[in-house]
Amino acid sequence: MRGGSNLLNIDRHHELGSFLRKRRERISPEEMGIPRGSRRRTPGLRRGEVAMLAGMSLEWYTYLEQGRAIQVSSEVLGSLARVLHLSPNERRHLFTLAHLHDPTEVKQPLPAVSPILQSLLDQLETTPAYILDQRMNIVGWNEAFSDVYGDYLYKGERQRNLVWITFASPEFRKLKGEHWEEAAVHCLAQFRAGYGQHVGDAWWQEQITELSMNSPIFKEMWDRQDVLYAPDGHKIIYHPLMGKMSFEYLAFQVMDSPELQMVLHMPAKGTDTAERLKRLSRKT
């Protein structure tokens, strides 16, 4: 058990180091008032520059990027977040990685969609809606969602995972058309934000490893270390029967089950998407 615990800790520290390095490389010296100079080979800031700006020693910051098992204070993390211009979501991810969780903690069972929540979905007749769990599995949906995206009733867990669907489903890629990459970036960044709370967990590690092997673009995007959570936005899909459909989407946590997230696709105003949904429902 001790060996397993140490391995999980190493994974978390390495993830923290990789995240810091990627964020350091994206900050230009000019943004921080530092002359670039002709000898600069490092993309972005140097380690020493980050350490100086954050008020810590170069040795200590280097240990962090190397993934060494050292402890840092909340004050130091806050300084690094400021120097690296981290967004609120990125800052949350940084703190999650730095504060180790107990790997022996009993895992709570994955939440189920309650009958009343499913009833709510079913009453949204012309609004495609679905429920995601913390692993981004689609665990509940309504008929409008099935009309647009296909029926998930008889699919296995992997085929109902939004990340796998995004990167491994040719049908989903056709639905998104030229907007697929934008959707993929958003999906993967949200997945990474969730992964930050489960670094070392066997399920998450297996998904990341297999997706990296099966999808080069997943691996390339994963290495960017993007973290994102956007509760609303705009989506466009290209349905094989109805053509272009535009939606405004909104996501929010379920109060009684905070591990679940409800996602609504509301037909965009000024478009004929609502009418196309009605016609589609009559065909299915």
Image (cartoon, grey):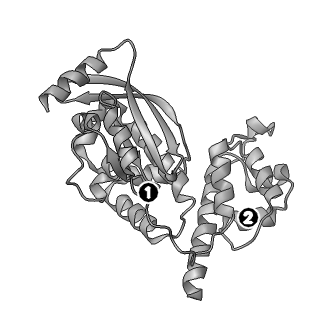
Residue extending farthest left: 283
Q: Which residue is mark 2?
A: 62
Q: Toward which corner of the image does residue 104 lie, by quadrant?
A: bottom right
Q: Is residue 119 above or below residue 2?
A: above
Instruction: Label 1, secondary structure: give it.
Output: loop
Residue type for callout 1: Arg
- Residue beneath disc 1: 135
N-terminal of the pair, mark 1 or mark 2, is: 2
Residue 41 visible in the picture = no
Distance Cα–Cα, label 1 vs label 2: 32 Å
**Residue at (54% x, 65% y) in the render:** 199
Q: Judge left or right: residue 257 versus residue 247.
A: right
SS at circle 2: helix
Q: Amino acid at mark 2?
A: Thr
Q: Position of residue 187 (x, y in %)?
A: 44, 44
Q: Is residue 52 left or right of residue 197?
A: right
In percent of the image, x 42 and y 52: which residue is there? Answer: 136
- Give the percent coordinates (x, y) of residue 273: 30, 20
Return the x and y of residue 148 as percentages of the image width and height: 25, 34
Whether residue 39 is visible, yes or no, is yes
In front here: 252 or 97? 252
Q: Quadrant of residue 272?
A: top left
Tell which of 194 and 212 is nearer to you.
Answer: 194
Q: Is residue 64 above or below residue 174?
A: below
- In-image side of 227 versus 30 (left or right): left
